[in-house]
Image (cartoon, helix red, strand yellow):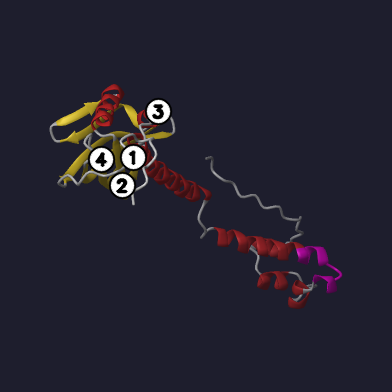
Amino acid sequence: MGEAVLKLRLPPVRWSAASSNGWPPTAANTVKKLPNCGPRSLRQTANCTPCASTCRGEATALRAISTVSSLSGMTTLQDLAARLDRVETELALHRLAHDYCVGADHRDSARWEAIWTADAAWETSSDQTFTGIEAIRAAVEQQWQAFPIMQHATANHTVEIDGAAATGRSDVVVLAQLRNHRWIVGGGTYEDEYRREGGIWRIARRRVVRPFDLAPLAPSDGPVDVDAPVRATEQ
């Protein structure tokens, strides 16, 4: 965004030789320098016949000067643009965290691949890292084969932004159904690195830390297929 320029349109003002010695003009020196004007005529210029246009012009100039002075303490357009960019960036990064869960849980390959940079790394454990889109896609497809249903829920997503790069952290709870209909519950924390390329934010690295798993739960009567309708509980 280019630098904003404030332009003021003022009517022509006829300054006397005496009043041109000082700038900016004030109500006090205007009254003193122009003998035909007084405090009342500055407030009610219609009552001043000899120099009504000059009084109105000087009064307008005084108001304009006051306006410019007040603008100096206001937020500039550059500041507003920077704040707006930060808000949009945070929303984009939060959207990445959501799309990660939606892509994995709903088996949406296009959405899943769109969240990663071409050279992204997905570190699912301390001894296993998948690098690149092809490897990351193959890894999630293995999870789809192992778990008929997955449900990720992320929370406490915080981000730190530094230009076209950012870092983030979020907590996750995962429910997954096994082939025998039993459920496992796990979770942990995601530590992320993000990168903006071509105006689009993507995950450059996601590392799973502090993982935990609970003992498998009893089998449920829920669907095996993600898209299958839920069966009504028998009475």
Which residue bears the numbered disc 3? 110
Closer to the camera, 123 or 152? 152
Against 170, residue 67 (above or below) is below
Based on the picture, tell me whether residue 55 belongs to the magenta stretch: yes
Which residue extends farthest right? 49
Element at label 3: helix
Q: Residue at x 61, y 64 (%)?
A: 66
Q: Is residue 4 visible?
A: yes
- Circle 1 packing at 10 Å, graded few (<14), some (14-19), many (20+), is many
Q: Are marks 2 and 3 in contact (CB under 8 Å)?
A: no
Q: Residue at x 57, y 61 (%)?
A: 69
Which residue bears the numbered disc 2? 154
| Residue type pointed to by label 4 | Ala
Element at label 1: helix
Q: Is residue 23 visible?
A: no
Closer to the camera, 79 or 161? 161
Magenta span: helix, strand or loop, mainly?
A: helix
Magenta region: 45-56
